[in-house]
Image (tube, rainbow, N blue to C red):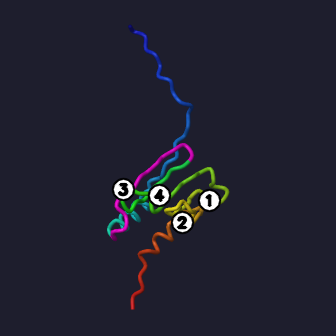
Amino acid sequence: MGVVTPFPSRPSAVQVGFERIELNRILDLYGRMVAAGHWRDYAIDLGTEAAVFACFRRAAERPEFRIEKRPALRNRQGMWTLFGEGGTILKRGHDLGPVLAPVERRFMKLVD
């Protein structure tokens, strides 16, 4: 009765996540897109290989954009990737700012 059986644990897999500065930048963009009426929902997936932030126009469809952080690619083509709705890679890079640039260009309007 006094015997405690240890809970079986998984191997120590490190979970990939977003740092506070990165998440602030992504959520700032998300907030502006919600205010503009483009996005209505988001999802965050934190896995062992990648962290993904997905942005949806409506909750019941595929994400319009996916921002993926994959640290294993840090020394190759860059750990940040921006995917489009069909799964195509729109932008890759080592820094988050230039990767988010195609989405942020939607806010630029010409003024006479």
Residue 42 highlighted magenta (yes or no):
yes
Q: Residue placed at 44% from the left, 61% from the top?
A: 26
Q: Which residues are magenta?
A: 36-49
**Residue 102 sits above or below residue 25 on the image:** below
**Distance from label 2 to label 1 (Cα)?**
10 Å
Q: Can you identify the residue that label 2 sits on? A: 99
Q: Is residue 41 left or right of residue 22?
A: left
Name the foreground residue: 67 vs 61: 61
**Distance from label 2 to label 3 (Cα)?**
24 Å
**Distance from label 3 to label 1 (Cα)?**
29 Å
**Distance from label 1 to label 4 (Cα)?**
15 Å
Q: What's the amino acid at mark 1?
A: Gly
Q: Can you identify the residue that label 1 sits on? A: 78
Q: Quadrant of residue 28?
A: bottom left
Q: Secondary structure at mark 3?
A: loop
Q: Can you identify the residue that label 4 sits on? A: 22
